[in-house]
Image (spheres, rainbow, N blue to C red):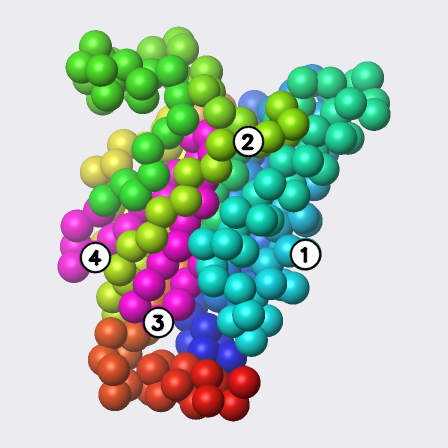
Amino acid sequence: MQASTVLEFASRTDPGLVRAQNEDALAFSAERGYAILADGMGGYNAGEIASGIAVAVLVDVLDEQLVNEQTPPRQALETAAQAANEEVFRAAQANIDYQGMGTTLVAAVFRPGRLTVAHVGDSRLYRLRKGSLVRLTADHSVVQEQIKAGLLDEQTAAASPERHLLTRALGVEPHVDVEVREYDAQGGDVYLLCSDGLTDMLTDAEIADLLTEHATVPESVCRRLVDTANDRGGLDNISVLLVRLPVETTDHNGLFSRIYRHMRRSI
Ligand code: MG
């Protein structure tokens, strides 16, 4: 038994009401304790190809590297994201229809008391802890740079026609600068990975309300988030992936830690 089987996952992806295709992709593994979400971009169906390749490569690399905790999550995520970048870039070079395609990426690995996040682009990771919602990723976008420089406020940025211009994307160049960060994780935390099809339609406060109201039933949170984005017009593909940590996670004598310690000893 793996430690992470006690994590609770739920997800939903939806084309929205305007786009013919769904260029978002996602995957998670309760066994390995990871969650991945990507939002592809490019002409024809290239966006779908880019996000699909990225998620498939991440799954392959993480499945291999996280077995028996042989690689630290930070290193596994960095290796996986670079491998995905190379694969998307190679596919774009090989097919004229796919030239210039790319994808965002947000991926998280959950371990007892700890969370490692890799991200590129404007797909996001939020954390709900004790009723308060925090955005753990800062978009790699032109408007986010302007907010950081004090030139824009969040509200103006959210309405800016330039809000979708990314400063980083996976697969568009031979190498990608992946932002990797680590955070403490606490029992009862709820994490939300999502694409901009959600965050364009709902404010952070509205996301917080929905997460708080339905946090005990992850599937219904996912459904409510997607339905609300569609109620507002569903202008883009909408993807959400929710991870709920059991309350025992930070209790070092708790079941989660005991299983984990046992696992470490048996390696
Ligand atoms: Mg999108």
For marks 2 and 4, give the CA distance. Answer: 31 Å
Residue 88 falls in image quadrant:
top right
Position in image of residue 34 (x %, y %): 50, 60
Q: Residues within 10 Å of mark 3 (few under 14, many from 20)?
A: many
For marks 3 and 1, give the CA distance. Answer: 23 Å
Q: Label for residue 263?
A: none
Q: Magenta residues, as a range?
A: 109-133
CB at mark 1 closer than 8 A to ligand 1?
no
CB within 8 Å, label 3 to label 4: no
Circle nearer the N terminus (3, 1): 1
Q: Is residue 208 left or right of residue 223?
A: left
Q: Amino acid at mark 4?
A: Arg
Residue 248 falls in image quadrant:
bottom left
**Disc 1: which residue:** 60
Q: Amino acid at mark 2?
A: Val
Q: Residues within 10 Å of mark 4 (few under 14, many from 20)?
A: some
Q: Residues within 10 Å of mark 2 (few under 14, many from 20)?
A: some
**Disc 2: which residue:** 176
**Disc 4: which residue:** 129
Position in image of residue 181 (x %, y %): 36, 47
Instruction: Write the residue at 28% across / 14% down.
Output: 146
Residue 78, magenta (yes or no): no
Residue 143 falls in image quadrant:
top left
Q: Residues within 10 Å of mark 1 (few under 14, many from 20)?
A: few
CB at mark 4 closer than 8 A to ligand 1?
no
Q: Amino acid at mark 1?
A: Asp
Q: Secondary structure at mark 4?
A: strand
CB within 8 Å, label 1 to label 2: no
Q: Secondary structure at mark 3?
A: loop
